[in-house]
Image (cartoon, grey):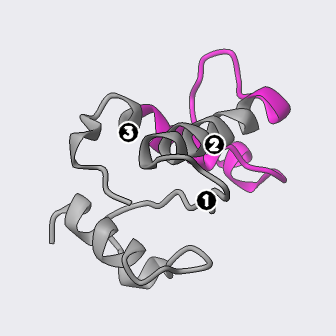
Amino acid sequence: MMLETEAQAYVSTCPTSGSSVATRPASGENFAIITSSTSALDAAVRGVKSWWSIIFRNGINWRVVYTEFLERKPNSPSSFTQVREWEFRDLSGFRN
C-alpha cells in the first residue's frame, strides 16, 4: 500500500494514539491530535509546528545528524526527521 493510502486508511479509523510499528514496518509515523481546528490545512500546520517545537525545546547537534543518543534521550526529536520530508510534499491530497 502506498504511504499516503496507508496513512489515510489509518486516520479514517479515528485513532486516539499512534499505530504499532508492526503494522507499518516500512514506514515511520508522526501522530498528533489537534483539537479545535478550523480546517484540515490548519490541523496540518499545527501538527507540523508541534513536531518542530521539540527541536526548539530539546535541540539537535550542530551537524543535524540523527544519532542513537538523540533517539534514546527524553523527548527524542525522532519526529523531526520525518517532518522535514513531509513539509515539502504537496498537501493537495490532504483530507480531514
Q: Secondary structure at mark 3?
A: helix
Residue found farthest to the top: 62
Which label belongs to residue 32? Answer: 1
Q: Callout 3, which amino acid?
A: Trp
Answer with the quarter of the image where residue 57 lies.
top right
Q: Quadrant of the N terminus?
A: bottom left
Please tell me which of labels 2 and 3 falls first in the chain.
Answer: 2
Residue on which disc 3 sits: 86
Q: Callout 2, which amino acid?
A: Trp
Q: Callout 2: few (<14), some (14-19), or many (20+) C-alpha neighbours within 10 Å?
A: many
Residue segment shown in magenta: 56-84
Does the magenta run of residues contain 8?
no
Does the magenta run of residues contain 73?
yes
Residue placed at 47% from the left, 47% from the top?
39
Residue placed at 61% from the left, 79% from the top?
16
Q: Is residue 4 positioned above or below 64 on the image?
A: below
Describe residue 4's horizontal placement relative to residue 78 as left or right.
left
Q: Secondary structure at mark 2?
A: helix
Please tell me which of labels 2 and 1 falls first in the chain.
Answer: 1
Residue placed at 68% from the left, 15% from the top?
62
Please tell me which of labels 3 and 1 falls first in the chain.
Answer: 1
Q: Cβ–Cβ below 8 Å for labels 3 and 1?
A: no
x and y, in percent, of residue 18 in the image: 56, 73
Which label belongs to residue 51? Answer: 2
Answer with the quarter of the image where residue 60 lies.
top right
Q: Nearer the viewer, mark 3 or mark 1?
A: 1
Front residue (pair 18, 60): 18
Q: Secondary structure at mark 1?
A: loop
Q: Is residue 82 positioned above or below 22 on the image?
A: above
x and y, in percent, of residue 75 in the image: 80, 50
Q: Callout 1, which amino acid?
A: Ala
